[in-house]
Image: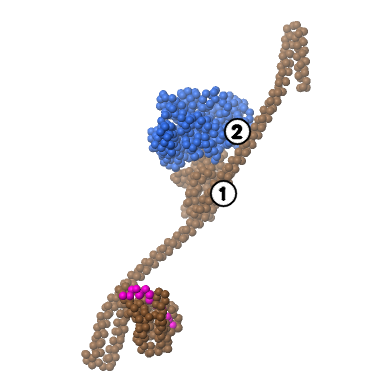
Chain colours: A blue, B brown
Amino acid sequence: MVPPTAVASRLPVAGAGWSNHSDAAEAGRAAAGAAVGGLADAPPHVVVAFASSKYDQTALLQGIRSVTREVPLIGGSDAGEITSEGPARRSVVVVALHAPQGSFGIGSAGALDRDQRLAGQTAARAALLRHGGTKRTAFLMVSDGVVGGGQDVIRGAQEVLGTSFPIVGGSAGDDLRFKCAYQYCNEQVLTRSVVGLLIGGALRVGIGVHHGWLPIGQPRTATKSLRHTLHELDGSPAARVYEDYFGSELVAATRGQLLARMTVSYPLGMAVEGEEELLLRNVLRIERDGSLVCAGEIPQGSLIRLMIGTKDSAVAAARKAAEEAAGALQHVACVILFDSVARQRLFGRDAGEELAAVRAVVGPTAPVVGCYTYGEQAPLRSTVQVGRTYWHNETLVVLALGL
Amino acid sequence: MKSLRPYLAVVVILLSAIGLIWLSDLAGQMVCVLALATATAYLFLSTGGAELDKLRGAYQALDEQAKLIVKTDMELSRAQEDLDRKVQGLYTLHELGHRLRSTVSVEDLFRKIDAAFLDQLGFDKGVIALSDGARPGLHVRAAIGYEPEAAAAWQERLNASAAWQALVCGKDILVLNRDELGTDQARAEFLQSLQLNTAIAVPLAVAEGGRGFILVGHEGAFARALPNDAELLSILANQLSIAIENAKLYEELWAERHSLELKVQERTRQLQEANESLQRMNEAKSDFVNAVAHELRTPLTSIKGYAAILSSGQLGPVTSEQAERLNRINKHTNGLSDMVDNLLDVARIEAGRVIMKIQPIAVAELLRNLQDILHPVLQEKRVRLTVDAAGVETCWADAVQLERVFMNLLSNAVKYTPAEGRITVTMRQEPGAIVTRVSDTGSGIAPKDVPRIFDEFYRADNTVNERLKGTGLGLSLVKRIIEAHGGTIQVASTLGQGTTFTFTLPLQLREQAA
């Protein structure tokens, strides 16, 4: 229920809905119906949707659009949904935002597998054109997580929007099948694409991004690395960093496994100039030659550390991120979370804990929705970085929308 | 040796400095400068190097400690995770156990293992298949996470592949992880067919000759099937097997009960039909009897009339021989006429065409009349009749019909009671009715005849009946009259000792009295 005063004073409000109905169209309709219903009689201005890739995506989107009609829509398939009540799977979550003071522009670009940078540019430019000349606040972006190259997509978008323009979001997933992820742009279901929503006008955003991991052991230098593949650290095969700490047997046993447990609990940390917190990099695969395929690029020459964390420190980080995001606003209409699928895996059945921490900060009124992603994007805050957006792994990105 | 080096360096520095001062040629000075620089550098480096060594050592030690911390941390979190998984699994199984115990149908049983349950156990998809006696092959009874068509298609593939059946129904628990399969194409294909990355299958221990399995798995690329999961699934398989057996037994029991009920219903229906047809036949018989009796009555009346005219001598003198024959005609036509009357009455009472005219009857007078009527025949047979109606002054009934009842019962008693025998009539008022008993010390009725003596035309097979003719309608008429009054009649008899007829006349009849 929306307090009548909120509508009367034209504060932005949001409604959220969730469904795990087995029929895609029905699930979409139910979730969108609940989301729009949560706005009382206020009309939605923008809709964000995340859903399992198990659904017939076209039918799902038709179901949602049968309720939300022509309202701009952005979103994508994921590896798990986040609702105000906690984590969910094989379902759909929809948030509808009523923000008369906001302005929105949606853009998309395909052929992500051919040129990520170009796709980033194209999507940002299209959104910019649609958004028009009013004040711009942030760019909410969802790219295909199966294709990858997230950092390059960010670069492309930055070339259009400006290096320090905040870009938030994550990559679309497919329930960890790594076959095909989908992106939603209004009534279109896209794949190998990037979609973006330029947010502006008087609507404000608050962004928090933290992971909660700390470096341990000696620093090493990435002496040979190309995009996502870290070949050598201090002149030795990169897998040595894991062999040194966990023994070569365990590393040999994990070889070939995707996102092995060991590399989820102990990701790599990459130092970024001016930042206290290291950027995390998940190792997707340990190759036979000892190189590490990561879920984000590692520039050659980067200082690399092994990272250690606990569920408690991860929950504390989630709380901190929520505080930073919500703290930046006077009034929070809704919160959208882009949470790493690696964190979902790490928390296992306790995945609700970090979401409860976020919920405790945000309070009971504003909906908290989101998705589990294959990689997150959010700006860094240090003076050196001046709000420049980076590609993250195993990190929670909290985006608060409001005034 | 190492500890002397700094002193040597100092000596070299001193000598070089002296040499630099004292030597004047450039070459000598150059050598001295070189020696001085080398020794100084060495001295500086050797003293500073020790600190660096110390630092490096501490750094190495810290890294070793880090390794220890990381390893401990990993072991701890692994143990914690195992424990969490086990606790959650056992909790879920416990919950399911509760649900299964309250389930009595096999179909319901499979419905209880749903997506939410699998999710709680930490799996994405699942299949339960069983063989059944009626159809060949394995049948998918529950497919969680699959469309029905996909499940049906997979069932076909499973039944076509002996290798797959051996995988899932073998003695061993099957634990498959896609990334551990290597070049095992068959297993990879099996996983692919289920769209799973991991699979655990445990055979179900079902009744003799049957087989089945429960299979669960993960879709996600980084999920792993662990021995712990297999353990958990075995427990589930056990629970499920027992529940299936129980439910089957219950279903069988229920089916048997149901078929019994159906049989009873069928029999009841048959009986009803038979009863109805009997009733129809009875009605037809009554109609027939009625028609025949009417047809007989008219000629009988004529015969009697003509015989009376002949006897009266109006048509000429009657010889004694003729008179005797005419008497016989008269006697036999009277008998026939009685029989026709009785037949007609039985038919009429049965059809409800006779209305009982209920009126108060003075009991003493009724009994006296009966005694008077029967007196000659009693005397002739030397049978004593005693009546006792102590406390009963009036009873309510149709006077004509009641007299008929008494006459029939008493003439029967006289007929079957040998000389010097005794007949007793007692009337008593009992709660709700006046009960009359007519007892004799006669030959009695054979037990086999007792149930049928009230049937029309039934005559017990005995010596008296062989000698004395009767219609077999008397008792039938008595019963119908009593029942038309709302009373009942019963008989008790011991062969060779006598018979007692007991009939009741409800006191309620008083209210119907005109």
User: Which element type, helix, strand or loop, lies under badge 2?
Assistant: strand
Q: Determine which of the numbered discs, if any, sits on residue B235 in the image.
A: 1
Name the residue type under label 1: Ile
Q: Is B130 in front, or is B6?
A: B6
x, y percentage for residue A153? 48, 27
User: Which element type, helix, strand or loop, lies under badge 1?
Assistant: helix
x, y percentage for residue A33? 41, 39
Q: Is A292 in front, or is A151?
A: A151
x, y percentage for residue A241? 61, 30
Q: Residue at x 51, y 30 (%)?
A: A327
- How many badges with numbers are in the image? 2
Residue B68 is at least partly visible in this image:
yes
Name the residue type under label 2: Ile
Reading the image, the residue beneath label 2 is: A308
Residue A376 is at least partly visible in this image:
no
| Apparent side of residue B62 relative to residue A327 in the rendered image (left or right) | right
Q: Determine the residue located farthest toward the top in the rendered image.
A: B24
Q: Is residue A343 magenta?
A: no
Q: Residue at x 40, y 86 (%)?
A: B385
Find out whether the residues at labels 2 and 1 contact each other: C-beta distance under 8 Å. Answer: no
- Residue A184 lies, with reference to residue B133, above or below; the image says above
Q: Residue at x 59, y 42 (%)?
A: B82
Which stretch did the figure color magenta?
B498-514
| Apparent side of residue B257 relative to residue B370 in the rendered image (left or right) | right
- Residue B323 lies, with reference to residue A259, above or below; the image says below
- Residue A98 lies, with reference to residue B1, above or below; the image says below
